[in-house]
Image (cartoon, rainbow, N blue to C red):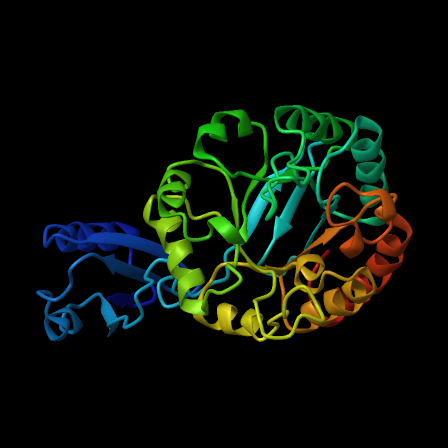
């Protein structure tokens, strides 16, 4: 249930009203906009009389939320959510609410020289975040699984050298303690509905980049986000990375319609992964531009200094030179969309 408070109402009155509501067995979520405050009631609201609420002198409007996702719902939080992340260089990077966040780097960390070199290249081109896999979920048990803890250490070294906040994937909740200095924890498509993991992430204080499962609906993505939000962590970035189809020309089918759909239903920022979606390096630039035009709040792009010899997903990785050229164009697209990059 959503309760819109009349503009100009004093904060103390709103707090007192919220306390009265909580006595009826619900939790109250506050969303304070420029014009008015919105209260979201979470829990069993069947016994709450909407007509009686409307009669209250503080209440302007009452809306019952039909969708199963509550905290992720834009009705609960009308304004766009912005994720702010401070790097070790003292600069704050942002995703959402008018900011286009660009995340770039290799699929997996391979060597010190590789990750340091790529991190410097993507920063010089304008990327705001460094991505890199230390722990890699692979379809085949014989494929490169990542360097593990060593890869994480190398990522942290690259973070120190460049000042870029880092994004890397968490596969096992037992590794969470080792991610203490990771800036954004990525949850991959395979773990999008790992509800035990999502519940634990709801209790942490780090931004979560939640990738859409390759056979999951828009509602299922938002319900996965709801698990994290319900635990108290509201720093979530949704990621469209392509869905499975009958056509195997591309690795997946990039569902760009998911971007405006998610942004209509939710306040959470939405980014796009054109690398995993297409699986083809020559498509990445076109799909990245299309994603920004569709309203995406950011991109996560695989960049490798020698794609032909990459240990993981070289065929979908672009070179630092191609990335630098793409960034020139993306800045123009961002200007058109009225976003800062």
Q: Is residue 266 above or below residue 209?
A: below
Q: How many marks?
A: 0
Would residue 24 be found to the left or right of residue 190 on screen? left
Residue at figure coordinates x 12%, y 75% from the top left: 51
* Quarter of the figure with the C terminus: bottom right
Would residue 309 be found to the left or right of residue 164 on screen? right
Q: Position of residue 161 (x, y in %)?
A: 78, 27
The residue nearer to you, when weighing 334 against 115, is 115
Please tell me in which quadrant of the rendered image residue 254 appears: bottom right
* Residue most extreme to the front: 142
Residue at figure coordinates x 46%, y 65% from the top left: 216
Q: Position of residue 66 (x, y in %)?
A: 27, 73
Would residue 112 be found to the left or right of residue 133 on screen? right
Res. 236 in view: no
The residue nearer to you, when weighing 137 against 116, is 137
Q: Position of residue 195 (x, y in %)?
A: 36, 47
Res. 102 in view: yes
The residue nearer to you, when weighing 129 against 312, is 312
Would residue 261 be found to the left or right of residue 126 on screen? left
Q: Position of residue 81 (x, y in %)?
A: 50, 56
Please tell me in which quadrant of the rendered image residue 288 appears: bottom right
Q: Is residue 247 above or below residue 44?
A: below
* Quarter of the figure with the N terminus: bottom left
Residue at figure coordinates x 80%, y 64% from the top left: 285
Q: Is residue 152 above or below residue 184?
A: above
Residue at figure coordinates x 45%, y 36% from the top left: 205
């Amino acid at each position: 249930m959503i309760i819109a408070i009349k503009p100009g109402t004093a904060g103390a009155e709103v707090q007192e009203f919220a306390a009265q509501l909580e006595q009826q067995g619900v939790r109250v979520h506050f969303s304070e906009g420029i014009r008015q405050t919105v209260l979201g009631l979470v829990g069993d609201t069947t016994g709450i009389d909407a007509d009686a609420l409307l009669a209250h002198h503080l209440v302007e409007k009452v809306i019952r939320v039909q969708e199963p996702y509550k905290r992720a719902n834009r009705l609960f939080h009308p304004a766009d959510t912005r994720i702010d992340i401070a790097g070790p260089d003292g600069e704050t990077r942002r995703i959402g609410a008018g900011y286009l966040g660009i995340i770039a780097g290799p699929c997996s960390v391979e060597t010190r020289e590789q990750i340091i070199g790529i991190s410097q290249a993507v920063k010089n081109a304008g990327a705001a975040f460094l991505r890199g896999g230390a722990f890699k979920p692979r379809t085949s048990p014989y494929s490169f699984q990542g360097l593990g803890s060593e890869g994480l250490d190398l990522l942290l070294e690259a973070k120190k050298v460049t000042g870029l906040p880092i994004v890397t994937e968490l596969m096992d909740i037992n590794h969470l303690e080792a991610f203490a200095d990771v800036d954004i924890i990525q949850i991959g498509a395979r773990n999008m509905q790992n509800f035990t993991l999502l519940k634990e992430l709801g209790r942490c204080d780090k931004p979560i980049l939640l990738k859409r499962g390759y056979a999951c609906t828009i509602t299922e993505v938002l319900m996965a986000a709801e698990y994290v939000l319900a635990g108290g962590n509201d720093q979530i970035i949704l990621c469209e990375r392509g869905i499975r189809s009958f056509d195997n020309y591309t690795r997946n089918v990039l569902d760009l319609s998911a971007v405006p759909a998610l942004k209509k239903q939710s306040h959470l920022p939405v980014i796009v992964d054109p690398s995993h979606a297409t699986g083809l390096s020559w498509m990445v630039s076109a799909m990245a531009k299309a994603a920004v035009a569709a309203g995406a709040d950011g991109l996560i792009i695989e960049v490798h200094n020698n794609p032909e010899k990459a240990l993981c997903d070289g065929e979908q990785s672009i070179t630092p030179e191609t990335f630098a050229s793409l960034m020139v164009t993306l800045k123009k697209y961002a200007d058109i969309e009225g976003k800062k990059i």
